[in-house]
């Protein structure tokens, strides 16, 4: 069988970590025939909990799991990793301003950028989950200049999957028959979940979602809001933020990136913007992408109507503002 792939999960003692590491060890991330070695990082106050997760991984006797590194040392955690899933961060607590969260997290990502650059595999693929996900990813890119910029992405696949799920519920289709929704921009409530190119497979024929649903007011209104606000709805219902859906979407993101997307299907990923569709350059912006041979490519040539373009611009501007704020935070 093939050599094990080293996969790092930061914040591994947290909620998403607890849902994610067993998925990785079961082959959901890289395939049922790909052995893995897990590198789990967390901070000192969570060291005991992290060791508990390590013990449970041992107890699960996962056949694909060839080793576990559980550490609070970021350099040790990064050593030789080929996939880095950055979940670790400082959560927003009640009463905290956006700027306070930003200050805490961008300094974490600045520090981890150097460790990744020095110790990770030269072609390591990185996905940032921790919020503000796009801007944390941008900070990683900026402070790891020797790292290939195309290898640094952020997770908007959960939002993408939420959009597919909503369309499936509304149309009664199986979610596996729904594809090509798009999440544009920031993983925040300014994101634009766009169904204008989404299709549903009905008896072997791809039918545009708009034709099938026949309710533009719902598609442009409640659907968009539901996807944008789904995170908050989960917190309200569960008293904790999304964890299993976030973990599952991380696996979808990395698996499609490494193993490719099916012909005719695209997915949403936060990637370094080249200005496609009028998005601001040099921010991490969520686009529709296809993946092949371990590389993502932004889907080109989609027709964007005026109303949509305005929404693409708004979420883009928010990313420009966040970038500016991040640099102000780093100066302080
Ligand atoms: P938790 O607070 O349960 O876990 C975070 C873990 O990170 C903790 O164990 C903490 O000790 C650790 N940590 C803090 N600083 C660290 C550092 N410097 N190095 C390594 N580890 C560190 O949060 P959880 O619910 O797991 O969520 C994790 C992050 O994902 C949050 O920032 C959250 O906002 C973000 N999310 C992003 C989503 C996305 O789609 N992009 C969706 C889910 C989630 O809300």
Image (cartoon, helix red, strand yellow):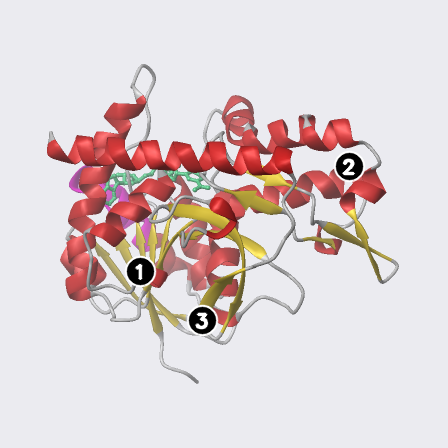
Residue 318 image label: none
Q: Residue at x 69, y 49 (%)?
A: 197
Q: Is residue 45 above or below residue 84?
A: above
Tell which of 162 and 30 is nearer to you: 162
Residue 154 shows in the view: yes
Q: Give the residues in magenta.
A: 41-55
Magenta stretch contains residue 322? no
Q: CA distance from mark 3 to mark 1?
A: 14 Å
Task: Examine the residues drawn in magenta and state their main secondary structure.
Answer: helix
Q: Nearer the viewer, residue 164 or 298?
A: 298
Q: Is residue 54 magenta?
A: yes
Q: Earlier in the sequence, mark 3 or mark 2?
A: 2
**At x 18% / y 31%, what residue is drawn?**
328
Q: Residue 23: percent from the left, percent from the top? A: 47, 57
Quadrant for residue 223, please give it: top right
Dot label at residue 149: 1
Labels 3, 1: front one:
1
Does the beta carbon of the residue at mark 2 sit less than 8 Å from ligand 1?
no
Task: Provide residue 36's location: percent of width, then percent of height.
Answer: 38, 69
For the residues bearing labels 3 and 2, Cβ distance under 8 angstroms: no
Task: Say whether mark 1 is within 8 Å of ligand 1.
Answer: no
What residue sits right under mark 2 in the picture? Answer: 170
288 sits to left or right of 120: right
- Quadrant of the rendering where the N terminus is positioned: bottom left
Please, is residue 27 above or below residue 10 in the view? below
Q: Earlier in the sequence, mark 2 or mark 1?
A: 1
Look at mark 3 in the image and give the residue it sits on: 294
Q: Residue furthest left?
A: 332
């Amino acid at each position: 069988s093939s050599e094990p792939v080293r996969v790092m999960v930061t914040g591994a003692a947290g909620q998403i970590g607890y849902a994610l590491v067993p998925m990785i060890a079961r082959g959901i991330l890289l395939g049922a025939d790909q052995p893995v070695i897990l590198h789990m990082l967390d901070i000192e106050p969570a060291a005991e909990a992290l060791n508990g997760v390590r013990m449970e991984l041992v107890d699960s006797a996962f056949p694909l799991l060839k080793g576990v590194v559980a550490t609070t040392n970021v350099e040790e955690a990064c050593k030789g990793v080929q996939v880095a899933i950055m979940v670790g961060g400082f959560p927003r607590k009640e009463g905290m301003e956006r700027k306070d969260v930003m200050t805490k997290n961008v300094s974490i990502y600045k520090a981890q950028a150097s460790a990744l650059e020095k110790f990770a595999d030269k072609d390591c693929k990185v996905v940032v989950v921790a919020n503000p996900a796009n801007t944390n990813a941008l900070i990683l890119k900026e402070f790891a200049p020797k790292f290939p910029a195309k290898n640094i992405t952020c997770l908007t696949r959960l939002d993408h999957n939420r959009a597919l799920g909503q369309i499936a519920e509304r149309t009664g289709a199986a979610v596996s028959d729904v594809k090509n929704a798009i999440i544009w921009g920031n993983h925040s409530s300014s994101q634009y979940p766009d169904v204008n190119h989404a299709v549903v497979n009905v008896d072997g024929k791809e039918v545009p979602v708009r034709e099938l649903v026949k309710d533009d007011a719902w598609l442009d209104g409640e659907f968009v809001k539901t996807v944008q606000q789904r995170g908050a709805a989960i917190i309200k219902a569960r008293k904790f933020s999304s964890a299993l859906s976030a973990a599952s979407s991380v696996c979808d993101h990395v698996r499609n990136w490494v193993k490719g997307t099916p012909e005719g299907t695209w997915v949403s990923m936060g990637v370094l913007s080249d200005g496609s569709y009028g998005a601001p350059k040099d921010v991490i912006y969520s686009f529709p992408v296809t993946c092949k041979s371990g590389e993502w490519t932004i889907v080109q040539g989609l027709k964007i109507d005026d109303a949509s373009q305005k929404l693409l611009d708004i979420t883009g501007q928010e990313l420009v503002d966040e970038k500016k704020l991040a640099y102000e935070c780093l100066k302080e």
